[in-house]
Image (cartoon, rainbow, N blue to C red):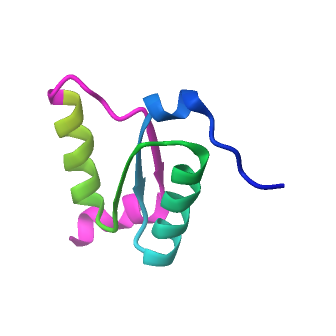
Amino acid sequence: SPTTSNPEFKKISALVIDDDLLVTRLVEQILISMGFKDVQTTRYPKTGLALILDSHNMGNPIDLIICDFLIIHYGIASE
């Protein structure tokens, strides 16, 4: 069945962090098709962390974070 947009999702901000560009774009498109309006993506853990901290410091924290565990576990040390 096709994905239907939920009006409640447009109020939710999301961040996708994955080093695989295909996965990042796929998840982004799925979230957009579900109705999410504010979807950010990055392939770099440090950039993701900066986006999380910046959004928090501006008083508008990211609501949903989807990330590859291994990129966070190994990626920050190797950047």
Relative horizontal placement of residue 77, taking residue 36 as reference (left or right) = left
Relative horizontal placement of residue 2, taking residue 58 as reference (left or right) = right
Does the image show residue 77? yes
Classify the position of the N terminus by image quarter.
Answer: bottom right
Point out residue 27 in the picture as x, y percentages from the top left corner. 54, 60
Comparing 73 with 51, the one in front is: 51
Point out residue 3 in the picture as x, y percentages from the top left corner. 71, 51
Relative horizontal placement of residue 23, taking residue 61 as reference (left or right) = right
Would residue 60 be counted in the magenta stretch?
yes
Which segment is the magenta one? 57-79
Point out residue 53 in the picture as x, y percentages from the top left corner. 21, 38
Would residue 31 be counted in the magenta stretch?
no
Q: Which residue is drawn at 56% across and 27% down?
A: 8
Comparing 3 with 77, the one in front is: 3
Residue that sits furthest to the top in the current view = 59
Quarter residue 21 falls in:
bottom left
Q: Residue at x 29, y 66 (%)?
A: 44
Point out residue 10 in the picture as x, y percentages from the top left corner. 47, 34
Classify the position of the C terminus by image quarter.
Answer: bottom left
Does the image show residue 20? no
Image height check: is 70 above or below 16? Answer: below
Image height check: is 53 above or below 59? Answer: below
Q: Which residue is drawn at 15% across and 28% down?
A: 58
